[in-house]
Each structure stands twice: as C-alpha cells, then as structure tokens.
Image (cartoon, rainbow, N blue to C red):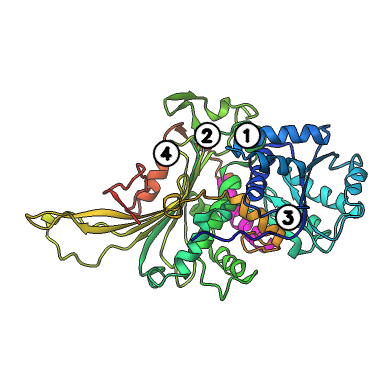
Amino acid sequence: MSSTIERVASFDYVVFGATGDLSLRKLLPALYERDRDGQLPDDGRIIGVSRIGLDGAAFRALAADALTQHAAPLDPATTDRFLARLDHITADAQGTEGWDALASRFDGVADKVRVFYLATHPDLFGPICQRLARAGLVTARSRVVLEKPIGRDLASARRINDEVGAVFQEGQIFRIDHYLGKETVQNLLALRFANALFEPLWNSGGIDHVQITAAESLGIERRGGYYDRSGALRDMVQNHLLQLLCLVAMEAPASLEREAVRDEKLKVLRALAPLTGADGLTHSVRGQYRAGAIDGEPVPGYLDEDGVAADSATETFVSLRAELRNWRWAGVPFYLRTGKRLPQRVSEIVIQFRPVPHSIFGASAGPVMPNRLVVRLQPDEHIRLRLMTKEPGPGGLRLRAAALNLSFAETFKRRVPDAYERLLMDVVRGNPTLFMRRDEVESAWEWAEGLLGAWRDSGERPKPYTAGTWGPSAAIAMIERDGRTWHEEDGQVEDGAPVAL
C-alpha cells in the first residue's frame, strides 16, 4: 500500500544563506523532491537570500547545478516547475541593504504561510529576526527555522532564544535537528508504542545497556574555522545524540499532540546524571585524530587541517557513559560515541537486552547470545533484531544467532525520503513535534556544560587516535571496564546471516 501525499498550504519559503552548502546540498533538493511528489502548492515560492550579488536567473542556474548533484535523476517537468518558483535577493543580515527589495516581494501577497529558514551562523539569528520585524515581514502565519547549533554554551543559547523570542512567539520557532526527521528515528516511536512486543521489556529489567553511535569517515572538510571553536561535544552530542537518547528513553506520551512528545523528552534531559568533576573524567573520553588512512587513502591529521590552530585542544571524538536517574532506567548505562575520521560512516542505536537467566542447553550447543536490537539511521536505514535459533540438520542441537531484518528500501519498495523533506513540510504545517523546544535546548546545554567544565578544569589534552580507527584505546577501555564492548557490524550480522522480513 502506498502512502498518500497531501499538499501543504500555500507558502513562501525564504532561505537565508541560500547559496551556502546546507541550502544547495540539502534544503533545495528536499523541496525539489516534495515538488516531484506533488506536495507543493502551485503558488509556493522559494526566495533565496544571501550576500552574494546574484539575480534570479543566476540563482536558478546555481540551484540547477545543485539539483543535478544531489537530487538526480531529475525529472524535466519537475525541474522546470521547481526552478520557476525560485528567486534571489541580495541582502546584508546586519545592515540595511536588500531589505526593501525583500519586502517588495510580498506586496499584495495573500495571507500565506511564511517560513524564514536561517541557514546562517547562529550569531545572525537575532539580527535577522530583528530586521524581519522592522521590514514588517513577520505575520501571524510566519514561522522561523533555526539550524543547530543554538549557541555554543548555555549563556549564548539563552541570548539567541531571547533575541528570536522577542520577534517570534515560541509556537512560531522551529529549532531543527535533522536526525529527528529520519525515517528510522521516527520508527522508534512506532516500534515502542505501536507494538506490544517491546514495551514490557523496555526498562532496566529487560535491557542491559544502550549504545548510540554517530561515526563519520570524513574530516572537518572546509569547516575548520567553525569546528575548531566547537568540537564534537558541541557539534554532535549536545544536540543529535542527546535527542536520540531522549526518544529511546522517554515515557509513552499520552498522544502525539504537538507538545506531548516534547514534554517527555524534556523529562529525560532533566533526569540525566551530571558528568562533572571526577565523574566527567571517569565516564568520558575525548580524542583528536592524527594522520592515517581512510579506505586506503592517506588523510592529514586534525592539526594539519585548514583553519585549525597549531596547538588546538579541540576534540574530534567523544565517547561517554551516561545514566538516567529515574525508575525505568536506574542502573542502565547509555554509551554515546561520535567522531571524525572513523573507519566508516554509520549512525545507529543498539539496544542490548539482558541474557536469559539460565541456559538449558549444553556447552556443545554453543553460546546463548543476548537479544540485540539495532536501529540503523544511516546508511541503508534498517531495523535488525538478533535472535537465537537452531541450526538446521541432524546430529544434535546447535544454536546460532540470526537476525530478523527490516530494510526500509526493500520492504516498502520506494525511495526513503531525506529527513529534511519531512521537516520542511512539518514547518509549513505548523507541527513542532520533531523540533526542539527552548527548554529542551537549554537543558541539553546545561548538562553539556558540566562535562565541558570537567575537561577544561582537568587541563588534559584530547587523546590522539589514528585516522581510520575507532578512536582512542581509552574509549574501548571505558566500556570494557563494565564488561561490555562496542557494537561494530560488518554490514550483516556479526554472529549469523540476516533473515529478511
């Protein structure tokens, strides 16, 4: 059965930073795919705003090149229709240039949904919103989308939230984390709350531990200036990984009503045990990559990257052990891991269930492995459940681990939409469920600042690791102290062949 595509309301999408990497690589291709599926209204407009002096025709040519790279294969009719929606305004976010021209694009326009997507540096969020207000562009049906990171610490996050909140009401502010738009992440809600199988075991009685990994084989690319002031904790843990932890650990909301899910996520963030002082150093490892090889190709070390200070102590890898102080999860460790220049690009959540309390099988049958649920976010989105089975054949009973495998691409026989496709349409719909609320952002920063403070006070530098490895050896030692190991798959199942569903 195919899903039904419903058109969204008439809108104007105004993208600030429209000529930047995020816009060209993700936002425009996502809107193009929604147009291809017939979800955009006929009068939907997309107006790019940047400091680059482009007219509409030049911006459309730039967009066409981006679509060829990131949305191929293109459909000629869709491409013509989509490019006709595009326009460009040259404007200075902190000055007066271009704002009258932008305002003129809305003269005589009916009361449509008006989305302002700020794909810019966070320091510009407040000034852009103030300029929008002065230009009279903020209406009751306006929304503003803020890209992460929202600041670099609690104080700056509060300042940005105050500045944006002075122009837009909280219900109009959509703080985006694209991980929450991934099909597999949303399936966590369906997996837990639409099936009676898992929820009775989804607690400290049934689960031994949880692992959340977001590994990247790439380095910092051309983001040295940004990344060297940020680091892996601010760039990935404080937002992406903590949001995934929230969806794994939250209580069942009363409904999917717009604030119910976010209320439950906030409770998880507030239940996180602080990682401060000695606890922060004991339960975390930070690393920095050195020169090595990825897929057989040599790559430079972090200190040799453009835009990185020669004596930088910025971490490119973090692993940590977190715990929640509540009844459901007391005593269950959550191991989080993220890094640059790791052996492969993979993001996944691993739910390790407790072993059976007693094995009735003799030693000749082989070991009885605990059940394990793997939720793969990227690449090749799938959900895989490891079970123990009997090997076929006579001559005694031999046990083997096999996997029930739900591959989205194979099961649903259709393209898996990019996360931005859903999130951009949710903004138009005014549905904030998959976006972060102000109190979520600030609670996450409050917890992250404790760990940042522990690192700063220790004076220790990040531990070196060779590019192409799974981080510092201390990260392995940290989890092995608990008698556990990091989950690393070879593309199938480590103990047996998968069984497709």
The residue that disc 3 covers is: 41
The residue that disc 4 covers is: 470
The residue that disc 2 covers is: 218
Q: Answer few, some or many: residues within 10 Å of disc 2's Cα (few below 14, many 20 plus, some between 14 and 19).
A: some
What type is the residue that disc 4 sits on? Answer: Trp
Q: Is residue 443 magenta?
A: yes
Label 1 or label 3, whichever comes before in sequence order: 3
Q: CA distance from mark 4 to mark 3?
A: 46 Å
In the image, residue 317 lies at what x, y percent? 51, 41
User: Is label 4 or label 3 in front?
Assistant: 3
Residue at (60% x, 37% y) in the render: 70
Residue at (35% x, 51% y) in the render: 481
Q: Secondary structure at mark 3?
A: loop
Q: CA distance from mark 4 to mark 2?
A: 13 Å
Q: Tell me if residue 39 comes above or below residue 22 in the rendering.
A: below
Q: Secondary structure at mark 1?
A: helix
Label 4 or label 1, whichever comes before in sequence order: 1
Q: CA distance from mark 2 to mark 1?
A: 22 Å
The residue that disc 1 covers is: 68
- Range of magenta residues: 438-455
Residue at (57% x, 65% y) in the render: 265
Q: Which quadrant: the C terminus? A: bottom left
Label 4 or label 2, whichever comes before in sequence order: 2
In the image, residue 494 lies at what x, y percent? 30, 46
